[in-house]
Amino acid sequence: MIPGGPAVPLFECRPARLLVAALSLLLASSASAQSLTDRLEFSMYGRVGVGWAPTSGEFIQGKTFNLTGRSVGGRLEEGDYLEPSLKLHLLKQAETNPDAPYAYAVLTPAMWADNGLFIGLTSNRFSSTLALELGEAYVAAGNILLPGLKFWGGVRFYRGTNVYLSDYWYFNNLSAQGLGMQYGPLDVAVLLQTSATLAEYAIDTDGDGKPDQRRQRTVLVAQYTQPLPNKHSVHLLAEVHSLPQAVTRLGDEQRVLPKDVGVVAGVKGHLDLGNGSFNDASVRFGSRIANGSLGGTPTWNTYGLPSASGKYSGAYGVEVVEHFLVNVNPLLSLNGYGILHTGRGASGAVADRYVEYAVGAQSTLYLHDQFHLVNEASFQGLREGHEKFGTAMKLSIVPTLVPTGKRDIWARPHLRLFYTLALYNQAAVDRVLSPYLQTVGGSKVGHYVGARVEWWL
């Protein structure tokens, strides 16, 4: 309970009510006589830990060293996060017939700290401490009408691979609400985006400072993955974004926000190097209102200012990613990445542009089946407009216990201790570019000591 205040039962808290209601709907969505045990699958991602800044008494959990405030450049300072997922088979596919119809529903809540440590919560202050969203709530059905034809509808994690070291879903991170269809190597979808707080979505029509009108962006997506010999592949991506006209009124003054469009094109190559090793490389170009890429944001997070006409003519965003894993031998694995984002808005102003990059690598020494010594280094830079590049170098040592005893960088759970040293240049300090600098003050040297468990089921 809140000191000096009344106790609030758990199920009177809005996030908890929403979660319980959603779970109830999912579990009640099938009247099949099959046992729930046969039809229900549970999976989960989670990370929980503690962290200290040795030179400061500030609460530092989740205050990343990274210049954009996002995970590009390294994830060790990330805060707590839980993502349990339920998959309910509404129509279970016959094991003896791969062409038999099937259908399932997925519900995935996501939880993280909104104020302090949510996992150590001993009161009922959920409304001020725990942030809870439904990351996924969708139904999919396959082998409908044709063998291999699959449909889905709802909100889902609609994305491909990620750079794990930066917790960065790249190239085709299209997680949103919509509907789609997949047949063989072809995947198409129609998505809607209305919830962002960007000015092109949320509009104040009466001058009270609060958005009371929203524009709805429609995104058409087409993806094609061409398998190649030896488990290699090429992945093609195309997006078309459309934003309708909107009219705002402030007293007698009327302002028209013109309709606008954007196009995205991308290609990604995958090389299977055997023994779990791989190399992935991708490039993606987004134009006009689909120019989002700064910090790894989705293409619909339009960057910059419009032109004098109110449109984003000439705006663009580019993403280039290189990601590799080499399992050298039973004693050593090397994982590394290079990321580049660059783009501009449509205003033509020198300040309305950016360049961001990050390179990093991690070595894992398998000193014992259940003890892995992880070492990580990264370097990143950020410049907006004509300012000097702000840079940060991060060096980490991460002794890790691995109960499963697998000599594999993907083995989980992990029980980690870690220390990270960050070195900033003067431009990064002067502009306090990272959440860490914004918390502890303007120092060129940062320290982070932590312990974390991470697991997935």
Image: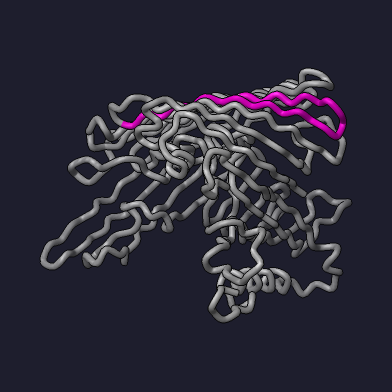
* Viewer can see residue 50: yes
At x 74%, y 26%, the residue is 364
**Does residue 369 show up magenta in the picture?**
yes
**Does residue 374 show up magenta in the picture?**
yes
Q: Is residue 68 left or right of residue 77?
A: left
Q: Is residue 150 left or right of residue 287?
A: right
Image quadrant for the N terminus? bottom right
Q: Nearer the viewer, residue 9 or 199?
A: 9
| Residue 38 percent location from the top left of the image | 85, 62
Q: Which residues are magenta?
A: 361-384
| Residue 369 percent location from the top left of the image | 87, 31
| Residue 374 percent location from the top left of the image | 72, 29
| Residue 257 percent location from the top left of the image | 24, 53
Q: Residue furthest bottom?
A: 6
Q: Is residue 373 left or right of residue 163?
A: right
At x 31%, y 66%, the residue is 212
* Viewer can see residue 230: no
Q: Residue furthest top?
A: 328
In the rendered image, which quarter is residue 447 located in?
top right
Q: Is residue 172 above or below residue 322?
A: below
At x 55%, y 55%, the residue is 179
At x 67%, y 35%, the residue is 418
In the rendered image, which quarter is residue 210 located in?
bottom left
Q: Magenta region, mostly helix, strand or loop? A: strand
Q: How many marks?
A: 0
Q: Is residue 248 above or below residue 271?
A: below
- Colour treatment of the image: one colour
Q: Nearer the viewer, residue 38 or 123?
A: 123
Q: Is residue 335 left or right of residue 300?
A: right
